[in-house]
Amino acid sequence: MTLDPTGVGPAPGALPAGSADRAAVPSAAVPHRWLILAVLCLAQLVVVLDNTVLTVAVPVLTVELDAGTADVQWMINAYALVLSGLLLSAGSAADRYGRRRMLLVGLVLFGLGSAAAGLARTAEQLIAARAGMGVGGALLATATLAVAMQVFDGAERSRAIGIWAATSALGFAAGPPIGGFVLAHLPWGAIFLLNVPVVLVCLLAGRMLVPESRDSTAGRLDLGGVTLSTAGLTAIVWAIISGPGRGWASAPVLGVGTAGVLLLVLFVGWERRCAHPMLDMHFFRDRRFVGAVCGVVLITFGATGALFLLTQQLQFVRGYPAWEAGLRMAPFALSIVALNISGAAALVIRRLGLPAAIAVGMTLLAGGLALVTHGPSDGYGALLAGLLVMGTGCALANPAIVEAVMSAIPTHKAGAGAGVDGTMTEVGSSLGVAVLGAVLNARFGALLPAALAGAGSFPATSAAAGPDREVVTAAFAEALRTGQTVGAAAVLIGGLVAAGLLWRADRLARRS
């Protein structure tokens, strides 16, 4: 039996001896594995939901907590910022101290943070609670994927990864409508308090069902690596998030971004010399791993940025409230879930191979974005068709790129792999929103009449326009089309580049 990380005795439900490498343990040795996956997906769902659910509560929070613009931005960004900075460290902790243990610790922290957020009475309290939720979210985002890698293998693993990835898409789309429904019937704190019973269910089920596993070769804690990676990633993500508002050339953005890059350079040097590194730099000598990691950044850059612009189109051009915009985007997420739960996506991925599945999936996603952007804007038909095509593309590409990352490293380093995948996803997503948002703003400013130039955001410009609001709306719609077209091109190019890198790596591996 694998020993509990505390050294007290066997962990409940521990995997068989030798489970540092799960390749030696078939899926059949792990009972209730599909029920375990359901628990993992439920935990992952609340992590992703809390990235988007707060958007519909901004007007209420502004009034009830007397929050200014900066306060609101920190309420939203504190969670994502802490989560992004800790993903690498959380993945390493899962491998070193036990994936089940870190899953349970993450649930406790996330639950406590949710309770504190729901009971907050000031903007500062809510920001602090959201940051605490980010710590738990980082542990959950890495531990859920790492545990799935341990309890599934072969074809079942591909399907499990697909379902796990589909859960993230569902959380992204479900956040605004769920938040809107809750706010229509309950106080705003219920948005967070509803997480608490979900966490309790996952805690009980996780303790009973999830087997313990860890990397028996991990060695002692790499404190230097944890410090450098956390500080560096937090600085870089802060600079990306702050760039559009403060200006990319502003001293704070340039200074913090440069400091982040330097810290990550120091992190790489430290890890190359550390006896027990939290992230083995030898992974980056593997062309397949490098190709997969590049693919994650490129794909999430285009996809997340373009989807962000789509929500802007639905709210500001078509006039839907945030919760209804999210509801109308539901077919996108539901198609991803249906194709992965049915096993159809996993079957197609196996037949095509990972590079081809990524290329086909991202081509479909780009095509769906183009249809949504340039198709008829009256009615729901063109939007629905585009969302279904996009969902089909994501159902193929997302699991394929996650599997490409995770299959490129030893299974006993699954936590580290999940940390890398999560970190690159967050960086790519933040860049996508920031860069495509900048394209949108630049085009919008260029199309506005001279009298309204420099008015700021669409709501502010529309309010200042008076009787000329239709001109402002038309300019914003055209700017969105430009940004979404750039996003669709980025999705296509990113997918083809990622597929090409993986195909080349596979070809070179077969030759050697």
Image (cartoon, helix red, strand yellow):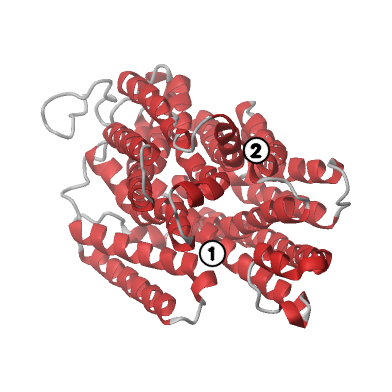
Q: Amino acid at mark 2?
A: Ala
Q: Secondary structure at mark 1?
A: helix
Q: Quadrant of the N terminus?
A: top left
Give percent across and percent down for residue 119.
Answer: 36, 37
Which of the pair 33/127 is nearer the observer? 127
Q: Is residue 4 left or right of residue 510?
A: left
Which residue occupies 26% across, 40% down? 215
The crowding category of the residue bearing disc 2, from other C-alpha atoms within 10 Å (few below 14, some 14 to 19, many at least 20), is: many
Question: Where residue 488 appears, x then y in whole percent?
Answer: 72, 60
Q: Confirm whether residue 289 shows in the render.
A: no
**Disc on the earlier residue, 1 or 2:** 2
Residue, disc 1: 431
Q: Which label belongs to residue 333?
A: 2
In percent of the image, x 73 and y 50: which residue is there?
314
Indicate the quadrant where residue 238 lies: bottom left
Q: Taking 498 as reference, is 408 left or right?
A: left
Q: Quadrant of residue 457?
A: bottom right
Total numbered labels: 2
Residue at the image point whose x is 52% and y is 70% from the top:
245
Residue 310 visible from this viewpoint: yes
> Do callouts 1 and 2 mark residues in contact (Cβ within 8 Å)?
no
Q: Position of residue 462 (x, y in %)?
A: 72, 65
- Above or below — where is 385 with respect to 221? above
Say few, some or many: other residues with alpha carbon within 10 Å of mark 1 (under 14 / 14 to 19 / 20 or more): many
Seen from the viewer's position, the closer of residues 196 and 199 is 196
How many angstroms separate mark 1 from mark 2 (CA)? Answer: 22 Å
Amino acid under label 1? Leu
Q: Is residue 132 above or below residue 81?
A: above
Residue 162, numbered circle: none
Between 22 and 106, the residue placed more toward the observer is 106
